[in-house]
Image (tube, rainbow, N blue to C red):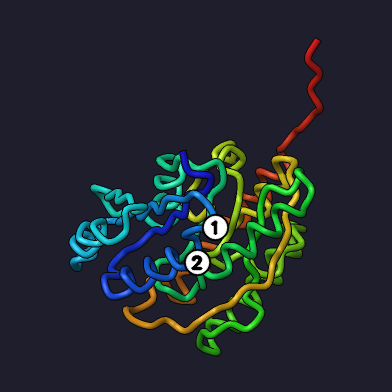
Amino acid sequence: MPDLSVVVPVHNERDNIVPLLTEIAAALRGKVDFEIVYVDDLSRDDTLAVLTAAKAQFPELRVLRHVAQSGQSTALRTGIKAARGTWIATLDGDGQNDPADIPKLIAMRDESAKEIKLFAGWRVNRQDSGSKRWASRWANRIRSNLLKDETPDTGCGIKLFERAAFLDLPYFDHMHRYLPALMQRAGWQVKSVPVNHRARGAGVSKYNNLNRALVGISDLRGVAWLIRRSKRTAVEEL
């Protein structure tokens, strides 16, 4: 059984697959027992064919495919449920996250308190357009004020977290953007770690600022409600 599962959701990312797989293998081989779980969210290009062919070059690779397009959060959860590792590292499939940061997150985990179950990437030098950076800055400010999650960058795709802790969280579409608040709601601690960020090398973004804003308003209200309605208590075994 691997110690780490790297989960990557993709939709129409055929030109980014092999370069990212190559980087993941270079970053982790010889350092940790790992597997790579790609989840194809019913791509319309030949992403699935590229992934299937890549299995010959990357024996760590497993490929799952949705039979209906379901979005990034569902693809992540699909991969995490299928994963065999105790800990999960996630990456966006567009190549903007740097797999070389995964060992840094693992090292941070090994020297941190056991109560910290999520190590969230923090893009301190974002390589996105000005409009996307502006929208993200305002969204982070509003979210932080409402949820009090004390996390500067919840939208970064590279994260490291305990699989069991994730699967204990409430599931809903777009939940991946609220993992710090949801982990804290469950009683765990979160640490933000500065990571590298790169410009997209190929393909096009699947999101725009308006869609994110409209969905985010509803999600914020829902997560705030979950936090208000949560109840935790210590348990003793007699």
User: Mark 2 — residue?
Assistant: 27
Q: Position of residue 47 (x, y in %)?
A: 24, 65
Q: Residue furthest top?
A: 238
Q: Residue 155: image x %, image y %?
A: 57, 67
User: Seen in the image, is 161 located left or right of residue 108?
Assistant: left
Task: Give whichever of 71, 25 is nearer the camera.
Answer: 25
Residue topped by disc 1: 31
Query: Quadrant of the image for the C terminus?
Result: top right
Q: Amino acid at mark 2?
A: Ala
User: For this view, does 123 lie left or right of residue 38?
Assistant: right
How many marks overall? 2
Residue at 76% x, 44% y is: 115
The reply to whether discs 1 and 2 touch (Cβ–Cβ < 8 Å) is yes
Disc 1 packing (10 Å; few <14; some 14–19; many ≥20)? few
Residue nearer the viewer, 164 or 134: 164
Residue 94 in the image: x percent, y percent?
A: 40, 72
Nearest the viewer among 234 and 229 is 234
Residue 1 at x, y percent in the picture: 46, 38
- The amino acid on which the numbered mark 1 sits, given as a three-letter code, is Lys
Residue 236's disc is: none
Above or below for 226 versus 92: above
Tell me which corner region of the image, top left, top right, bottom left or bottom right, holds residue 46: bottom left
